Amino acid sequence: MNRPEVMEKPRQSLAALWNISFGFLGIQVGFALQTANMSRIFQSLGSSLDDLPALWIAAPLTGLLVQPIIGHLSDRTWLGRLGRRRPYFLAGSILAALSLFLMPMSSSLLMAAVLLWALDASLNITMEPFRAFVGDMLRKDQHTVGYAVQTAFIGVGAVLGSIFPALLDRWGVSNTIAGGGIPATVRYSFWAGGAALLAAVLWTVLTTREYSPEELNQFRDAAGDDAAATQNVDALANRSFGVSIVWIAVGISILFAVVEWRLQKEVYLLGGLLIAYGIANAAGIALARRGATANMLANIVGDFSGMPPIMKRLALVQFFSWSALYTMWVFTTPVVAQYFYHTTDTSSAAYQEAGNWVGVLSAVYSGVSAIAALTLLPFLAKSIGKSRTHTLCLLAGAAGYASFLFTRDPKMLMISEIGIGIAWGSILAMPYAILASSLPQRKLGIYMGLFNIFIVVPQLLVATVMGSIMKAFFPDQPIWTMVAAAIVMAVAALAMLRVRPDEQAAKIG
């Protein structure tokens, strides 16, 4: 069968780059409100410090399930004028806006936890196709700048979402509530955030036009992709069930360990997930052996097993990077409240002031990430390469986390956030720019979704294991979580030394 004439994708203008990624500004407003305020909401509703990781489990678990499914489906979707990825942007943004509206109206921990699950599911439905969208729309020599623009919008959105409660407090909106509960500053911020999210995503939906499947097939990026469509499922059929049995056995062992060693109850989830993956892996192998090449489960398991080498190496970097980030998001509020504002009383004005300052700190590192994405990262990537750039940025983040241990002035933490912001900007841009230039175009959605498993798994580990570690070794001393984050981020930088995008480009070129 003759292929159509192969051609390069057209270069996108600055205005087009703006439109392609503008929706991510709204998505990140939602994520920023979630990360900066959920621990505050949970504690305001009566949660203890030890319970925070368990309450946060809903967010990463949702991403683990949703992103590969949405990636697989969006690769195979075409709804005419609405396109390939945009249907998922639109549906997810509507659900996320509704969740943001309801979240600050929570009257119990259970209600807040359920809404966190709904919010994170909706944000993941919206976010995952955006990563592949950039790869769909841009030629390879624009991937770095494309993901840098996306990261800049992420940074701006995070600034807006993080700082809004503090601004409302400054403008006279009540930052406390008699008898405890969610203050008005947080309620109004979530409502404004929901409106901003929906408006930003609608901008991208209405101002962009996706390439049709026929157009994508003509571009050089898709050359040779036909063979990639089913090769991982075919390879899965030749795999043994032994690996599946090992995963199930490890999961069962963890369940017994929880009982024997009296670990935190959240660790049950970790064991259950390993068992579930073992079962899914076995089911995928069985389906592949029956020739079910179009089955979603077989495709997802096959693509996960058959990830390209560069993706596997980047996955290890992501695992450690996001372990550090998630530790920061869960524990920054109690760390700042206890060590910088000298309170553990969640109903006190000092605690709520600490919560607002955490929002400001989140805005600082998010703002730094936006500036770095548009200035520092493209310059360094051009000068020393994407891999070395990401290594240096991760080391800057490790230094930022470590500095929490050596200062007690909350204002000085803004310096710490500069290093964290540089790392954050690179984490949001460099791995995706490397991947988008190295993966088959037809499978960009599923591979981006699978790549995000290595964002989610470390979050689950932090949520299930960190509580047990803290309770056993550092009871009521959350400052040590920042030391752990510094060490883990440094390990991510070391793992990045094994990533060679130029070698991968040569193999696929």
Image (cartoon, rainbow, N blue to C red):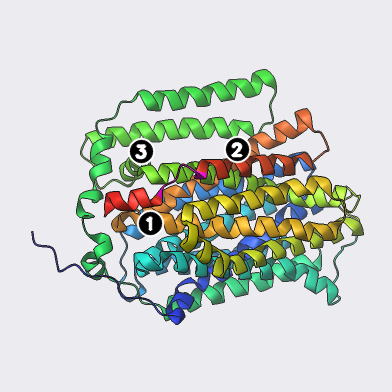
Q: Name the residue tied to disc 1.
A: 445
Q: CA distance from mark 1 to mark 2?
A: 25 Å
Determine if the magenta segment contains residue 499. Answer: yes
Q: Report the Cα–Cα distance between label 1 and label 3.
A: 16 Å
Check the image and name the residue furthest to the left.
1
Disc on the earlier residue, 2 or 3: 3
Q: Check disc 3 and report its element: helix, strand or loop.
A: helix
* Residue at (30, 66) in percent of width and height: 78
| Residue stretch in magenta | 496-500
Task: Say which amino acid is labelled 2.
Answer: Leu
Residue beneath label 2, please? 461
Residue 188: image x %, image y %? 74, 71
Residue type, mark 1 in image: Gly
Q: Is residue 59 visible?
A: yes
Q: Is residue 174 magenta?
A: no
Residue visible at 45% across and 79% down? Answer: 14
Q: Quadrant of residue 301?
A: top left
Q: Quadrant of the N terminus?
A: bottom left
Q: Is residue 347 left or right of residue 58?
A: right
